[in-house]
Image: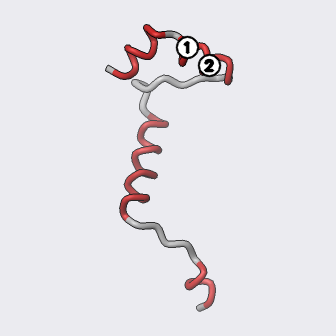
Amino acid sequence: MKQEKDREKYNQVTLDAMKEAKEIARDSKYPSYETLDELKKALLDENHRKKVTN
């Protein structure tokens, strides 16, 4: 029984955020990057930011 007490319990807000993160990770309409350099370039590119945020 001690294991059950020690198990982490997440509130509904956290569970919803985890679900949303999984959905975003699998959705092709959100950009993904192979390298950190690609991500940095995209973050610095104003046209790319407008496309992603609109």
Q: Residues within 10 Å of mark 1 (few under 14, many from 20)?
A: few
Kind of element beneath mark 2: helix
Residue with the mark numbered 2 = 40
Kind of element beneath mark 1: helix
Spot occupied by residue 27 in the image (x, y as percentages of width and height): 42, 32
Quarter that holds the C terminus: top left
Q: Residue furthest left?
A: 54
**Which labelled disc corresponds to residue 44?**
1
Q: Residue furthest bottom?
A: 1
Q: Name the kind of residue labelled 1 in the image.
A: Leu
Quarter of the figure with residue 40: top right
Residue at (46%, 44%) from the top-left corner?
A: 22
Q: Residues within 10 Å of mark 2 (few under 14, many from 20)?
A: few
Q: How is the image coloured?
A: secondary structure
Residue at (38%, 14%) from the top-left corner?
A: 51
Q: Is residue 27 left or right of residue 42?
A: left
Q: Residue 14, relative to residue 50: is it above or below?
A: below
Quarter that holds the N terminus: bottom right
How many angstroms separate mark 1 from mark 2 (CA)?
A: 6 Å
Residue at (49%, 37%) from the top-left corner?
A: 25
